[in-house]
Each structure stands twice: as C-alpha cells, then as structure tokens.
Amino acid sequence: MSIIIKNAKQIEKMRASCQLVKQTFDLLENIIVPGVATKELDEIVVKFLKKNGARPSFKNYRGYPKSICTSINEVVIHGIPSPQRLEEGDIISIDIGAYKGGFHGDAARTFAVGKVSDEAQRLMDITKQSFFEGVKYAKVGEFLGNISGAIQDYVENQGYSVVRDFVGHGVGASLHEAPEVANFRDPKQGRGPRLSAGMTLAIEPMVNVGTHEVVILSDGWTVITKDKKLSAHYENTVLITSGEAEILTI
Ligand code: MF3
Ligand code: CO
C-alpha cells in the first residue's frame, strides 16, 4: 500500500474539506454545555455539513451508525452519539470527518464541559501539545516514525500513556489511506517511510491518564480505557511540505 501524493488541485480540495471540519468545531464550541445530549451534537453537525455541500465521512463507514464520534471521560474514541446528556465536569472528545469535492477532512478535539478537574485539564493540554510535538517532524525527508516517537516521548515524560491499539492514518479520497501513523515507536513499523511533499496525514494522539490498555464495548465501537481512567484525543489533518507542515484543520 503506497502513500498517495496529492497534486495542487487535490490539495485545494483537501483544504476545503478540512476547513469545513474546522468551522464545524467553531460552531460546536459554544454548544458543548451541561445538559446537551450527544445525539443533538450529531444532528447539528449533519445539518451544518449538508448546508455546506458536504457529507459526514463516518456515517455508515464500516457500519458506523452515526455521523460523528462523541467520547466522554473514560471513552477513548468511537463513542456513539445517544440520548446521554453532558454533565458539568465531563470531558468529551469529538471526532468529525467531512467529505466534499471527493476528499475527506478529519479532526478531533477534546472539550471541557463547564468546569473540569485539574487532572482533566492537564490531560487535555498534554494531549493537544503531544500533537504539536509530533508535527515538528512532519516534513519532507523525515522518517514517519519520528512523529510517532516524539508524541510517545512527550506523553510518557508527562506521566501519561499513549493508546497502541488505534493509530492515525493517511487521508484523502479515502478516509483511511496508507500509512498508519502510530503514536508510539512501533517495532513492527520501524522508522517507517520518509515523508514527501503532498502527503496528507491524520495525526491523532489518544492519551490516557492511566494504562494504555483499552477495551471495546459490546456495541462493537465504543473504546474505553481498561482502568476507566480519563482519556483525551486531539487530531488534525496535515499536509507535508518542504517547510513546516500545513495543518489543514486549524
Ligand atoms: N478519526 C477517526 C478515524 O480516522 C474516526 C473514524 S470513526 C468511524 O479513524 F466510524 F468512521 F470509524
Ligand atoms: Co482519523
């Protein structure tokens, strides 16, 4: 599975899909308050994407039943929107994909619901920063594995753990393309391929306060931490260039 290089025209389309994901998060920011049901967030996103000529990338992807992922507290990823209402002190990771003009944009953010514990805030800050530590290595000529290693080192130095069972990915005309973008040094991948201009990657650290181990619930989707401690997720789609990576979903 070789890594697909996007040309200038394709990159323009990626930018549009990715900017729409960014705007969707701007819209949600003020709506994430105690009392809102996660299925209401899903409905708001579907409407907004539709209005902007896009469709949600995740709906029906391998049978996924909803349009976004809403992962509360110990839920790492792939929480399914439901009548469950947000409560003061929760943290919620929201993952959104938008498909428009033949290309996907993919990003995730973790939000505080009202006032959260110091530990929850620290987890969110470290998760976000780990992305930026990794993205320093997202440039032409670097090895892919240096992104993974930088994320792992930063997170573990802060006393937290990175999830191993799920990873980032190439993204483009398909939601998931080569390569896998691990958030840890994966012996099975080694240092990985060298990066080239025009590659588009979804870099998405999933960080746990406790053990890195996760469990999938019986719905077949919801991934939680094995020790039920908090988890956070931060993801952007980035374009590799000869200079700094262009972060397309910011
Ligand atoms: N950002 C996640 C990913 O790229 C979201 C996928 S959710 C799914 O894997 F439902 F589409 F699988
Ligand atoms: Co992704």
Image: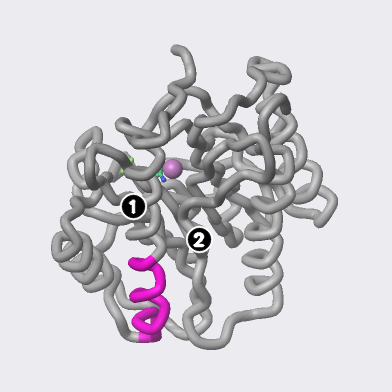
Rendering coords of residue 156 (x, y %): 79, 47
Q: Disc 2 versus disc 1: distance between alpha carbons? A: 12 Å
Rendering coords of residue 155 (x, y %): 75, 50
x 21%, y 61%: residue: 49
| 63 horizontally vs 188: left or right | left
- Foreground mark, 2 or 1? 1
- At label 1, counting other C-alpha atoms closer than 10 Å, the crowd grade (few under 14, some 14-19, many 20 or more) is many
SS at badge 2: loop
Rendering coords of residue 201 (x, y %): 51, 37
Residue placed most toward the observer, 35 or 99: 99
Residue placed most toward the observer, 29 or 65: 29
The quarter of the image that holds ligand 2 is top left
Residue 99 highlighted magenta (yes or no)? no
| 18 horizontally vs 82: left or right | right
Query: Which residue is identified by label 1?
Result: 16
Q: Which residues are magenta?
A: 23-34
Query: Which residue is identified by label 2?
Result: 250
Residue 25 highlighted magenta (yes or no)? yes
